[in-house]
Image (tube, rainbow, N blue to C red):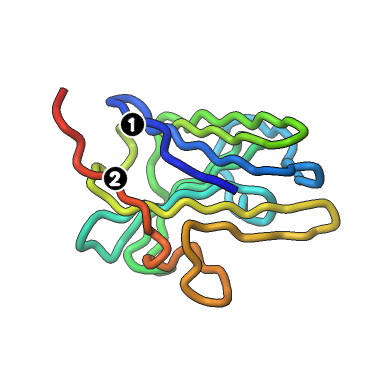
Amino acid sequence: MEAKILSITDSWMRVRWRIDGPGKLVVPRFAGRGRADNLWETTCFEMFVQQPGDTGYSEFNLSPSERWAAYDFTAPREGMSERDFAREPDCAMRMGQAMAIFDAALPRSQMPEPPFAVGLAAVIEEEGGVKSYWSLCHNSEKPDFHDPACFTASLGRLRAA
């Protein structure tokens, strides 16, 4: 599994997750764009963003079904509220025999402003209900994507063009 921020422009933040050996991957059926909760119950791609010195953070859940969710938290797993998203993320899943690629473009106008720490994560479900939890870092034996110690990537302040 690999995850990375591909680019950030005035309009979009583009993120990619790559899964090697997706033969048994469970891909949620197309459901059309729209907000939905509990996407993490099956294959789902997640991004966490936290600005320096802040205990709060934002969470973005993105599904191959094209459903999505965005939340703000005041502290780890506390004070959850829906994050406003006037323009929906654009998501696409491409499947091959050797790998699967999930690309997401999130509207910049609805994202926190850099600089920020980033946690990229995924819940991967395989046939038979087998689930694995992927993150840039797991700080304990039990995966917890909301642990700020897992927000190990960073995006610096953007320079003016």
Q: Residue at x 61, y 48 (%)?
A: 44
Local packing at callout 1 (Cα closer than 10 Å; few below 14, some 14-19, many 20+) is some
Q: Name the secondary structure under disc 1.
A: strand
User: How far across and how far down the image is residue 108, in percent?
Assistant: 33, 33
Q: Residue at x 24, y 62 (%)?
A: 54
The one of 28 and 118 positioned closer to us in this rendering: 118
Q: Residue at label 2?
A: 155
- Distance, label 2 to label 1, CA atoms, is 10 Å
Check the image and report above or below for 40 versus 18: below
Report whether 109 appears left or right of 63: left
Report whether 69 appears left or right of 113: right
Check the image and report above or below for 84 versus 56: above
Q: Residue at label 1?
A: 8
- Inspect the image, locate mark 1, and give the three-letter code of the amino acid beneath it: Ile
Q: Residue at x 34, y 57 (%)?
A: 57
Q: Farthest residue in the left direction? A: 160
Checking the image for residue 143, the label placed there is none
Q: Residue at x 77, y 33 (%)?
A: 97
Check the image and report above or below for 70 versus 130: above
Q: Farthest residue in the bottom direction? A: 141
Cβ atoms under marks 2 and 1 closer than 8 Å: yes
Q: Which quarter of the rendered picture does the C terminus lie within?
A: top left
